[in-house]
Amino acid sequence: MFSAFARWVYRLAGWKLIGPVPDIPKGIWTLAPHNSNWDFLVGVGARAETRIWIRYLAKKELFKWYSGWFFVALGGKPVDRSRATNMVDVVVDVLQQTDRLHICITPEGTRSNVQKLKTGFYYIALKSGVPLILVGVDYPRKSVILSEPMYMTGDFETDMRPIYAFFSSIQGKRKDWLKRYEETGIIG
């Protein structure tokens, strides 16, 4: 019921989904840029369009007593970013213990502008053998753009080039995103 409503609102607002919806049992949906609170609502609508239940990791501060139930009901899992935990291995273990699971991660780790992406999403995909699906939230085109599933090889530079190229083609709500890559082509 909620998914049908989310799809309706997403379409009513003029958003569309571009790219193939993968038919795979597991995926790490890597969404960027994430520099606006509106990204969450757009993402919920896009998820409804895919008709795949995609869980997501979010900072624990969102899961307050008055709002936590809402984010959990929408598939959220709180992450404590203040503690040094080995989140990569935890997510890899969960992926290896289940037959079907899709998880969304924002590789920037913040809504502030970044010059490079964090690498946890990469190592989760590499260690678990689960593909990445790149998800670009493009505001001028009112489109959520999906890549084909991408399997990581372990050659960091080679694997990251198409990831940065994909995300550099996406225009978020703010304009100066991934500036370092666009200016220099340097990864990491």
Image (cartoon, rainbow, N blue to C red):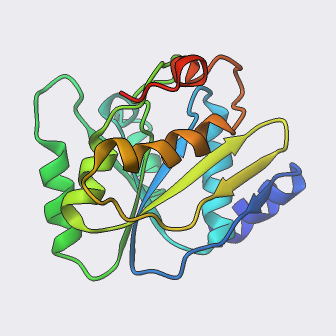
Residue 5 lies, in percent from the top left, at 73, 64
Count of number-bearing discs: 0
Q: Residue at x 60, y 23 (%)?
A: 182
Q: Quadrant of the C terminus?
A: top left
Tell whether 57 sits left or right of 88.
Answer: right
The image quarter in which residue 33 lies: top right
Q: Residue at x 48, y 19 (%)?
A: 114
The image quarter in which residue 83 lies: top left
Q: Residue at x 74, y 61 (%)?
A: 17
Q: Quadrant of the N terminus?
A: bottom right
Does residue 7 lie above or below 80 as drawn?
Answer: below
Closer to the camera in the image, 57 or 2: 57
Residue 128 lies, in percent from the top left, at 22, 65
Q: Is residue 49 visible?
A: yes
Residue 39 lies, in percent from the top left, at 63, 38
Closer to the camera in the image, 5 or 50: 50
Tell whether 188 sits left or right of 20.
Answer: left
